[in-house]
Amino acid sequence: MARFRVVATGGTFDEIHAGHIALLARAFEVGDRVIIGVTSNEFASSYKGKKLNHGFDQRVANLKRAISEKFGDVKYQIARLDSEFGPAVTTGEVGALVASAETKAKGPKLNEIRRKNGLPPAEVIAVEMVKAEDGLPISSTRIRAGEIDRNGRLLRPK
């Protein structure tokens, strides 16, 4: 049984990989329903400085396909992220944020914004980064660079 009625998670989801699947698996494990924030093209390039292979609509379509293939019939909704936290700071029904270990440190900032918005704090659940064969985290950046595949297998020497 899930511990939370609604949880939130998010990412850019440019090249969906094993790390994304681990993040989503944890979110579906602890939440009855998951709000998945997908970074807008503008936010990804201006705030995060990312050069993407896929536009927003394609990333959402790829994410929906991956969820269907990996998790079957689960309850989720996709929200466009034009800011760091999106629905996690505006929706009182969100009881937890499922985040990568590297972004867990943003939990206090998230809860400060929630407090200012009159919302109760959300629990922050960290998911360890999934490592590639070389021991470094799997990331869309590394996949785009041709270093690794979606499962972390090395494609060329560093």
Image (spheres, grey):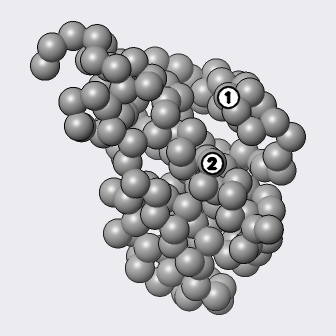
Depth order, front residue of 141/1: 1
Left or right for 63, reference 2 = left
Q: Is 58 placed above or below 42 here?
A: above
What kind of element bears circle 1?
A: helix
Depth order, front residue of 132/124: 132
Depth order, front residue of 86/67: 67
Q: Residue 97: x, y in percent?
A: 57, 66
| Quarter occupied by the C terminus | top left
In the rendered image, which quarter is residue 34 located in? bottom right
As drawn, which residue projects farthest toward the left?
158
Q: Residue 44: x, y in percent?
A: 44, 38
Mark in front: 1 vs 2? 2
Number of residues whose C-alpha sits closer than 10 Å to that of mark 1, classed few (under 14), some (14–19) or many (20 or more)? some
Q: Amino acid at mark 2?
A: Ala
Q: Amino acid at mark 1?
A: Ala
Residue at 35% x, 69% y is: 105
What kind of element bears circle 2?
A: helix
Residue at 36% x, 26% y is: 152
Marks 1,2: beta carbons within 8 A: no
The residue wearing badge 2 is 25
In the rendered image, which quarter is residue 30 located in? bottom right
| Quarter occupied by the N terminus | bottom right
Residue at 28% x, 17% y is: 154
| Label drawn at residue 66 | 1
Regarding residue 27, the answer to whether it shows in the image is yes
